Each structure stands twice: as structure tokens, then as C-alpha cells.
Amino acid sequence: MKTKITLVFLFICIALISKAQPQKGTWEVGGSGYFNKSYTKNKEAKFKILKIDAEVNYFIFKHLSIGTIVTFQSDKNYDRESEPTIRELFIAPTIDAYLLNRDKFAISMKGALNFIVASNLTIETRIPSYMIGPKFSWNISPNLSTFIWPAYRRLEEFDNTIGFLSTVPSDNFDIRWGFSYFFHRKIKE
């Protein structure tokens, strides 16, 4: 635990001394999505996944933002007899520290703490999971960017599946790709 606290402290210190943009007061709105339909060798449907993420962040400093991700996920497994379709809603507070931000690209460290807020499954315990990793952004215009976020994902239990079948599915790794739009604060002259 002491090591984790030390790493978080160092992460914040590095972010505070870096010279990154956008400016304090900027809002970032973005999202990503995922759809996959898998078939058996006999061309029968095996499962279908739909996942939609919406994200809002606010820059409390010129290089540090806090926000939230809201995720809806629908998972239909044609082999599952009971509850063939699982629908879940997740909410994840986030922190994003920009280490480098240039005109055309940016690198940041992003973390999220995931909670299930609604599910059609009966879940006895709702242990949160977390995700952390570098986020790489490419600026299309001063206000629009696309990003890729490869993240280590810690799942405390199997039924908390915010990263389940992401772009690159695995038990402990998630890659998210999406777009962000920045609403920059008006500077008074």
C-alpha cells in the first residue's frame, strides 16, 4: 500500500511540474464505442457485445483534469441459458495528468476507478476495479483530437467487467480508442 501511495504522489508531482496544455478551465467532452459479433464455425451467432463510453473532464490546472466516464454495456451470449443478455451501467471517476502536450500530439497518464451502478444481474458485492495507463492523443484541430488509451485493468471480481471485450480483450489489459472535443476557456483581453 505504501508503494502505491508513493507512486501516486510521484505521478502527481511529475504532472504538476510538466508544461502541458490545455489551460485551466478547459472542458473536454469525448467518447468511444465498441461492437463485436462473433460466430461459430457453423456460422451461428455465439455472442454480441455493444459498449458505449461517454466522458467529461475539467482541467483544474493547465495540465491536470478530473472527470468521469459513463459506460453502457450490453452482452448477449447465445450459449447462456439463464440471463442470455446482460446489461450494465458503469461510472468511473478519472484523473488525467498531461506530461507532454504539443501542437499535434499529447501524452498523459490516465487513471479510472470503475463502479457498477446498474445491472440486470443479481450481484451480491460490487467491488470497484481500477484502470491506469498512458494516453496518447493526436490533435486534429485546436479543439478536436483522437486518442488511444492502453491501460492496465485490475478486476477484483469477474462480474465487474467494464473492460470486458475491449478493442484488445484480456483479463488485465484494455485498449480504448475514441475522440475528444475541447471547449477552451475564453481569455479576457
Image: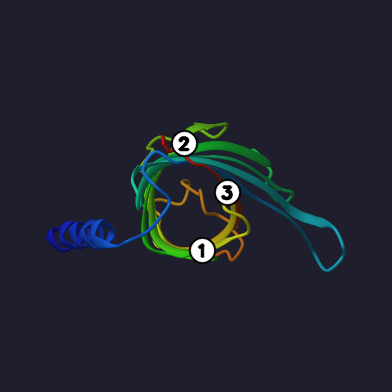
SS of the residue under disc 2: loop
Residue 108 coordinates in the image, percent (x, y)? 40, 61
Q: Distance between the residues labelled 2 and 1?
A: 19 Å
Residue 188: image x %, image y %? 41, 34
**Residue placed farthest to the left in the image?**
2
Q: Earlier in the sequence, mark 3 or mark 1?
A: 1
First along the sequence among labels 2 and 1: 1
Q: Which residue was labeled with disc 1? A: 103
**Amino acid at the residue labelled 2:** Lys
Give the numbered dot on residue 186. Answer: 2
Above or below: residue 92 compared with residue 100: above
What kind of residue is marked 3? Answer: Asn
Q: Name the residue under label 3.
A: 143
Residue 89, compared with residue 136, is above or below; it is above
Q: Residue at x 51, y 66 (%)?
A: 105
**The quarter of the displayed image where residue 132 is located:** bottom left
Check the picture and name the quadrant holding the C terminus: top left
